[in-house]
Amino acid sequence: MKIRKAGIILKKGFKKPRRIAEEIINWFSEKGVKSVVDQVTKDLDILIILGGDGTLLHIADKASRYEIPVMGINLGGLGFLTAVSIKERFEALELLHQGKMKVESRLLLKTRLLKESETESGSADYLYALNDVVISKGDIEQIINLRTWSDQEFITTYRADGLIFSTPTGSTAYNLSSGGPIVQPQLPCILVTPICPFMLESRPVLLSPDVTLVTQLAGKADNVKVIVDGRFTWKMVENSRLEVKTASKPLHLISMPQKGYFEILRNKLNWGGTGHKLPNRPK
């Protein structure tokens, strides 16, 4: 990977990312690489995220549209996406400069809310999600009914507190806490997971990445929100339709070559405790 110009995105409101950014700018300068801060433009060869997963999520849409590879240095909490630790930053930069970092393609979703009068060929703009698109009820006492289709085939009417449409990357986010499966990021699919379903038989499903999902409120409900990658986006009303499908361009996510997906899961989710010696695979 030839790097001529790098973008550095800072976690807002903290001094530490600014200090580390200055170190990275100096490191790039010694390699003859120009750096800019808090800008995402199509002439960038790499984006370095200094923050947590939330910081990365906010720029995933633009990065994927411009096809800019992204490397996250974790200054936040769990850091599933920003998987390079602060201690590894210069090791990771050196491997990046040598072209030895691992680049993965991560599926994104695109979504739009269509009003009752709008057709599917209408002009409503799409928003993009690397993790998930969530329909969430606003009132504690109400259950919402969501008629849901996969292309032209009716799936079911979910009676639940809400509904999660998730990418494999987002399977370890809200989907996981709602009882959905963990999915390897390389598996192309869309997850549909009800939130606290009224009927326990209402289970999560994995669908082809080629389908278009449509959900409509069945009956009136107050303050039903659509949240795209953690950001409140729309209020959903009766007869409006939420459309979710796979975006045409993935996000190119850079990670340390020696770190496997399940190693990250063991460390972040504390599977089996930490510090245990790994067993040898039987021959």
Image: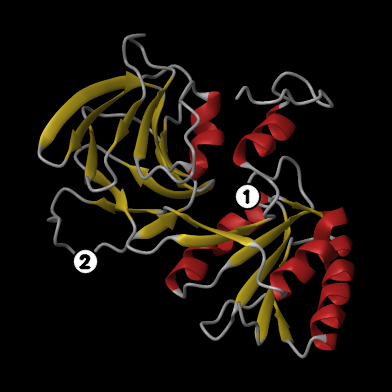
The x and y percentages for residue 192 are 35, 32
Give the residue type that dot 2 points to: Ser
Residue drawn at x 61%, y 40% as measured from the top left: 261
Give the residue type that dot 1 points to: Leu
The x and y percentages for residue 168 are 45, 41
| Residue found farthest to the top | 200
Residues at marks 1 and 2, CA–CA distance in whole angstroms: 32 Å
Left or right of 283 in this view: 25: right
In what element is the residue under mark 1? loop
| Residue indicated by mark 1 | 81
| Residue indicated by mark 2 | 123
253 w.r.t. 203: above or below: below
Residue drawn at x 63%, y 50% as measured from the top left: 81
Residue drawn at x 76%, y 63% as measured from the top left: 92
Q: Relative to the observer, which residue lies in front, 125 or 89? A: 89
CB under 8 Å between callouts 1 and 2? no
Quadrant position of residue 250:
bottom left
The x and y percentages for residue 103 are 56, 61
In what element is the residue under mark 2? loop
